[in-house]
Image (tube, rainbow, N blue to C red):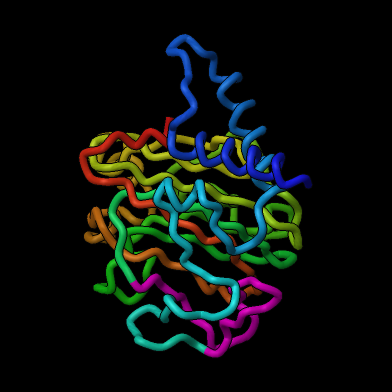
Amino acid sequence: MAPLYRKAAIAAVVALSVGLVAQPASAKKSKAEKKEKKAFALAEAAAAPNTLSEQEKKAGFKLLFDGKSTDGWRNYKSDKIGPGWKVVDGALTRAEKDAGDIVTKDQYEAFELLIDYKISKGGNSGVIFHVQETESTPWMTGPEVQVQDNVEGHDPQKAGWLYQLYEASTDATKPAGEWNRLRIVIAPKGQKSSVYMNGTKYYDFEKGSADWDARVKKSKFGKMPNFGKATKGYIDLQDHGDEVAYRNIKIRVIETGAAASAAK
């Protein structure tokens, strides 16, 4: 790709990601979805793995994985990381046993997370947010965005769904063994959060809303008093016993009180 086109492509997706692309109030949903998918395609073609463009840096994105080491990650309730997590071909990979869930060094409240994953055949994992280290497992406090092989996976909760709470009406995933890109926008309190798969918007939700509380009550999490209560916490990559790889892990903090324009 020519350098000039590469810069334009990266600028396009960053602009959309941080809400700099103006959308008329009367714009149809289908038009917004087409722009999202186009920006995703341009970014996928242009960006080098585990790097930030100048535009992304200016927008406030930071890398949570440098493509070379496991620095910045540790096991849940530990200051070390299990030997089962390895850096393989520039990806943070749950490659072997003795891995365990890993969490970020810092806690995050409102943020935009970009993360690519490649799941093994029949595999299962997850990206969990607002995790607190008060329970025996991360998912007892933090909601989980499912990661799975939707074809041969055994869990009825599909990739990109907010586990037992919100689901998508379509399947935008690529097959096991190929890279998929999740975009998770966790908005400040009182605003809608969103999840996207490969440029396709899956759903909106608002933590702590009446709808949220009703869904939690009906799920297995309804009996867990601390589930979904924290408004700030660690980001967790789940070890579900299967091989899974993550790369291009980028985060942009959304200041409390600011509009989560990326979710629009």
Residue 196's place in the image compared with 30, above or below, is below
Q: Is residue 219 magenta?
A: no
| Image-based side of 140 in relation to 198, left or right | left
**Residue closest to the eye, 194 or 216:** 194
Residue drawn at point x = 61 percent, y = 27 percent: 35
Image quadrant holding the C terminus, namely top left
Q: Quadrant of residue 90?
A: bottom right
| Image-based side of 13 in relation to 113, left or right | right
Residue 163 seen:
no
Residue drawn at point x = 60 percent, y = 19 percent: 31
Question: What residue span does the magenta drawing correspond to?
Answer: 83-105
Residue 57's place in the image compared with 83, above or below, is above
Residue 247, percent across and down? 60, 64
**Residue closest to the eye, 16 or 133:** 16
Residue drawn at point x = 70 percent, y = 41 percent: 4
Residue 12's place in the image compared with 57, above or below, is above
Residue 255 seen:
yes
| Image-based side of 184 in relation to 170, left or right | left
Q: Is residue 93 magenta?
A: yes
